[in-house]
Image (spheres, grey):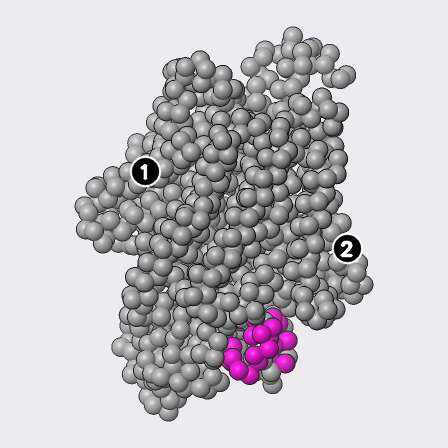
């Protein structure tokens, strides 16, 4: 353990918050941005960055409640399938049931919440581990989306519906406002409320949290429901952006989301994590993909880079963490 | 609650044996019951040819699930296995086409599987990075890397002798089925009766206690991943040699099928509990369900939903049963 | 648990009952109108009414006539034989033209969401033209329109978008032409009054859904006694396709006299399933496939005909069309375009360029192709 004196030295010179995972990550991101920006003049333009925000909103919206869930030591693999199910039900209720579109949107959000609630209720009441429960509903919800839609797409929504997905509001992509609001609200909830502190308590030691009289089951039920609801919202934004519903929408989102959250320093073991870290994680993945593409790196090589970054950054973060704790 | 169940099961070996036996027995009953139910509906389902095709076509999933079960029992998870199987199949096929001795082509898949998985095991065990992060990253690396290297060019013109899956032992038992049974029995015996096998349960069930008993947790985890790599290599060989072409891409959602087989087979994702016999039965059950749904004319649009419900029902029933056992 | 399984089974059977009652058209996933061709080659097809140009137009595209241009090709997915072949055709054309650079890049899975992001990135990076094969005709439209609005030329091939989102679409073979070739081959090889089943990728894949719909219409019209048994999904996965085909063979027994493979993955896997079941000659396999994967089965006489256009030519033609658009030699209203070694290609349906009739590979000619 020859590193310890070094870490001590570092600790004296560098303020503690600079060694935090999120800060380190943000610095890495900044360096990468400048590097990639230097290689392609079209990368660091406001237009491009805002556009990347537009493209990543759907994943971002889901990553926020996923941060909550992972902080409690849980996981939700069914989010991508909930996106598919909600997208299908949005289209189906509008076209086949003849719901007015606002009602159809409300209905699909409700279905998202209900799907999340089902995950939550089985996880808390029957004590099925979240990983297994959500693997099962990953198949179930996708299957429902396929069965209900019979693989048919729904198209031809009214023009106004495309506003959220495609237009700008005050110079910023409309859906980015949704994401910004969601980020601020989640950050405040996690940082400043009893609810947020309960999440950490559950993640650190669930049994202890129970014995301290914290409403563990209720809190878990809420976050899984919230995860479903946000997946529903994400589905609506996605449909509005791409103008059509398909039953294969959102496939693979779960891995993108989890990668972003974990990259952002949230520990998969629970108890550690911030919304700010998740935001940096999302930005990092999206901008790396975009920046590499603009500098001429192909898609297959890009995912190799993303995978490597995921492992290496977690490695750096956890060794820093251990050094700090080791002191 | 679950912790209590585990503790209760762990302390009384006789009861544990009973619990595990009944878990496997239930799966076996489900496999047979399903066959009969579908057979009543369409007798062709029970034709020897169909039953053997179901086993033959899915044996590789059962073989991979044996390794996955060990990983999960040790308290870890592996998301990269599907991608790895794709890569190993390509390596082996490329060697065979380019004139390497067939045995070398076969061995290469096994060796490469062990190397990649042991490497992941080292990162997980010694650098203490969560398995889900390491294997998620590796999934990305293998998937992108495979396409970068091969450009997705299919491997064709494989030599006939390469087709391991075509071998029939004693002109009767197809090699994949034989391998599935052999691997399952060996792994089950090893995990139950050898010290190193039991160490996996100890590490997964209670890492601290395992450490106190003198079991090296990191070494056990690396061993588990290396073995998992070996099984993944074997699965890749069955996968690669079943058909005349190798796709050189990552089989979609394969990791999910494999994890599902382990979990439905009674391996607790919390670690410390489960047997590979259960996971093999579960892999057979899942394959049987997929085939049965076609036989009883379930509209293909609903197949995935039905599969989801079946997994859910199996898992919930299993948990309720364990709880009752623990309470009794 | 037994109870649970029983309940799930009951549910499954109920679902099955309601589902099989609804099966009229073969696939169900495509409700677009169908347009079957005439039954025998001699009969004249009703000439479609001449359509006006219905493609889009880039705004303020820089004039690069005769100047070097940089193109990007974004196929449905990269890393499969078919799109490797189209990509090769593009490189061939670029070499022949001399003033075109083209690069292929795209998602590793056929996901429309990823494909949109790739196109978006290339719009930002600034290319002169985009070639695409759409994962979804409607979902891809907004991003293509964005490209047009930035003065980038857009030409589709293999899988179309809505017409106004691109300038031209190079059509490999008309859907009803493929359908006719497939059904005629099946009727000839399996027999006019026999039963067959279909192995497809997914029901959401637009081209496959379209072909199946046209096959249904053409069979209704020209081979009404052919019996469709069912269609199964097998993704783009070799082993799954093989398992599904095997299940169909075991399920239907003697009733099954033919298998259609709708993708270049499903067809060889179906042929392998028939070979393994030792039913070569009893079950005809007809399908879309690339020659290399089919050679063993065609040479073993297990498969008699493989239907496909030449994907290398398709990529080649798409590049020539793009060059002609940039040079201004292919304008709305044109009736044909010069495409290098392929000669003159005709404009159909307003804004589509037809590559030609589908090609049928047989034992005699399959050795001449390598892709």
Residue A31, position in %: x, y? 58, 28
- Magenta region, residue range: C273-300
Q: Chain of mark 1?
A: A
Mark 2 and mark 1, same subunit? no
Residue C276 is one of the magenta-drawn residues: yes
Residue B275, position in %: x, y? 62, 42
Q: Is residue C213 above or below residue C59?
A: below
* Left or right position of B129 against B296: right
Tag 2: Cα neighbours inside 10 Å, few (<14), some, or many (≥20)?
some
SS for callout 1: helix
Residue A147 is one of the magenta-drawn residues: no
SS for callout 2: helix
Which residue sits at x=52%, y=45%?
A: B264
Residue C159, position in %: x, y? 42, 63
| Residue B26 appears anywhere in the view | yes
Residue C4: image tag: none
Residue B138, position in %: x, y? 62, 42
Q: Chain of mark 2?
A: B
Q: Which residue is mark 1?
A: A114
- Residue B277 or A157: which is nearer the viewer? B277
Which residue sits at x=67%, y=23%?
A: B209
Q: Specify the quadrant that holds the C terminus of chain A.
A: top right
Q: Which residue is mark 2?
A: B107
For the residues labelled 2 and 1, the Cα–Cα distance comes to: 50 Å
């Amino acid at each position: 353990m020859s590193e310890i004196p070094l870490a001590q030295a570092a600790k004296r010179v560098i303020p503690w918050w600079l060694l935090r995972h999120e800060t380190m990550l943000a610095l890495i991101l900044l360096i990468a941005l400048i590097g990639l920006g230097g290689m392609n003049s079209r990368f660091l333009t406001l237009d491009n960055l805002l556009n990347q925000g537009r493209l990543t909103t759907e994943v971002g919206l889901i990553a926020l409640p996923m941060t909550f869930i992972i902080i409690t030591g849980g996981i939700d693999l069914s989010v991508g399938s909930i996106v598919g199910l909600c997208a299908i039900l949005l289209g189906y209720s509008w076209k086949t049931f003849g719901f007015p579109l606002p009602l159809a949107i409300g209905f699909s959000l409700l279905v998202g919440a209900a799907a999340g609630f089902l995950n939550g209720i089985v996880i808390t009441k029957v004590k099925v581990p979240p990983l297994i429960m959500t693997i099962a509903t990953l198949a179930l919800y996708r299957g429902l989306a396929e069965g209900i839609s019979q693989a048919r797409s729904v198209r031809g929504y009214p023009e106004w519906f495309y506003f959220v997905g495609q237009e700008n509001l005050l110079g910023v992509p409309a859906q980015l406002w949704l994401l910004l609001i969601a980020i601020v609200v989640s950050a405040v909830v996690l940082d400043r409320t009893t609810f947020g502190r309960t999440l950490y308590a559950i993640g650190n030691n669930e049994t202890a949290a129970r014995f301290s009289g914290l409403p563990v089951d209720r809190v878990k039920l809420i976050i899984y429901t919230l995860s479903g609801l946000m997946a529903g919202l994400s589905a609506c934004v996605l449909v509005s952006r791409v103008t059509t519903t398909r039953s294969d929408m959102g496939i693979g989102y779960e891995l993108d989301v989890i990668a972003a959250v974990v990259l952002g320093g949230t520990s998969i073991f629970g108890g550690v994590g911030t919304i700010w870290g998740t935001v940096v994680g999302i930005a990092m993945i999206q901008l790396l993909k975009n920046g590499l593409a603009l500098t001429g790196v192909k898609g297959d090589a890009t995912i190799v880079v993303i995978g490597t970054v995921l492992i290496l950054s977690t490695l750096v973060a956890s060794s820093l963490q251990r050094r700090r704790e080791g002191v | 609650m679950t912790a209590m169940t585990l503790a209760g099961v762990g302390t009384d070996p006789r009861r544990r044996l009973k619990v595990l036996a009944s878990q496997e027995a239930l799966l076996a009953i489900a496999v047979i019951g399903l066959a009969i139910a579908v057979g009543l509906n369409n007798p062709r389902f029970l034709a020897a040819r169909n039953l053997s095709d179901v086993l033959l076509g899915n044996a590789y999933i059962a073989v991979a699930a044996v390794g996955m079960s060990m990983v999960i029992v040790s308290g870890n998870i592996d998301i990269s296995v599907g991608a790895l199987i794709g890569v190993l199949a390509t390596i082996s096929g490329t060697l065979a086409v380019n004139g390497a001795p067939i045995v070398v082509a076969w061995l290469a898949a096994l060796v490469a599987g062990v190397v990649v998985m042991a490497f992941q095991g080292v990162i997980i065990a010694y650098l203490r990075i969560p398995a889900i992060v390491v294997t998620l990253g590796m999934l990305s690396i293998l998937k992108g890397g495979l396409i970068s290297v091969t450009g997705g060019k299919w491997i064709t013109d494989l030599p006939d002798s390469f087709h391991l899956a075509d071998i029939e032992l004693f002109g009767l038992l197809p090699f994949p089925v034989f391998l599935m049974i052999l691997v399952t029995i060996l792994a089950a015996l090893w995990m139950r009766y050898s010290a190193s096998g039991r160490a996996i349960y100890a590490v997964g069930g209670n890492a601290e206690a395992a450490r106190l008993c003198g079991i090296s947790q990191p070494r056990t985890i690396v061993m588990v991943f290396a073995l998992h790599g070996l099984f993944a290599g074997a699965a890749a060989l069955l996968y690669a040699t079943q058909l005349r072409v190798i796709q050189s891409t990552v089989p979609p959602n394969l990791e999910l099928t494999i994890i599902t087989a382990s979990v439905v087979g009674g391996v607790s994702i919390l670690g410390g509990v489960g047997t590979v016999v259960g996971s093999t039965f579960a892999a057979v059950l899942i394959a049987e369900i997929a085939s049965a749904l076609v036989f009883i004319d379930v509209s293909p649009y609903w197949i995935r939903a039905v599969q989801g419900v079946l997994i859910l029902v199996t898992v919930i029933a299993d948990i309720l049963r364990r709880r009752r056992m623990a309470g009794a | 648990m037994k109870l649970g399984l029983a309940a799930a089974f009951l549910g499954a059977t109920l679902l099955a009952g309601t589902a099989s009652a609804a099966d009229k058209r073969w696939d169900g996933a495509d409700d677009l109108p169908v347009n079957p061709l005439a039954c025998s080659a001699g009969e004249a097809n009703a000439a479609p009414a001449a359509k006006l140009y219905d493609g889009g137009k880039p705004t303020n595209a820089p004039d690069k006539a005769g100047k070097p241009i940089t193109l990007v090709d974004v196929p449905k997915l990269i890393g499969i034989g078919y799109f490797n072949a189209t990509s090769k055709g593009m490189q061939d054309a670029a070499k022949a033209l001399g003033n075109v650079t083209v690069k292929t890049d795209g998602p590793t899975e056929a996901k429309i969401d990823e494909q949109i992001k790739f196109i978006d990135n290339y719009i930002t990076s600034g290319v002169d033209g985009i070639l695409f094969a759409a994962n979804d005709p409607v979902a891809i439209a907004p991003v293509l329109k964005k490209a047009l609005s930035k003065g980038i030329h857009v030409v589709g091939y293999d899988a179309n978008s809505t017409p106004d989102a691109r300038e031209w679409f190079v059509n490999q073979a008309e859907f009803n032409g493929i359908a006719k070739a497939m059904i005629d081959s099946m009727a000839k090889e399996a027999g006019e009054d026999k039963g067959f089943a279909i192995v497809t990728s997914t029901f959401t894949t637009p081209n496959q859904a379209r072909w199946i719909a046209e096959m249904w219409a053409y069979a209704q019209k020209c081979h009404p006694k052919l019996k469709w048994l069912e269609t199964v999904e097998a993704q783009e996965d070799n082993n799954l396709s093989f398992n599904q085909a095997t299940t169909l063979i075991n399920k239907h027994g003697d009733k099954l006299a033919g298998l259609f493979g709708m993708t270049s993955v499903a067809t060889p896997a179906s042929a392998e399933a028939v070979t393994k079941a030792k039913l070569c000659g009893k079950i005809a396999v007809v399908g879309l496939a690339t020659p290399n994967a089919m050679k063993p089965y065609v040479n073993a006489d297990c498969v008699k005909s493989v239907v496909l256009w030449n994907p290398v030519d398709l990529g080649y033609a798409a590049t020539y069309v793009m060059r002609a658009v940039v040079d201004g030699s292919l304008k709305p209203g044109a009736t044909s375009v010069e495409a290098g070694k392929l000669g003159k290609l005709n404009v159909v349906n307003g804004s589509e360029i037809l590559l030609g009739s589908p090609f049928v590979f047989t034992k005699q000619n399959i050795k001449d192709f390598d892709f």
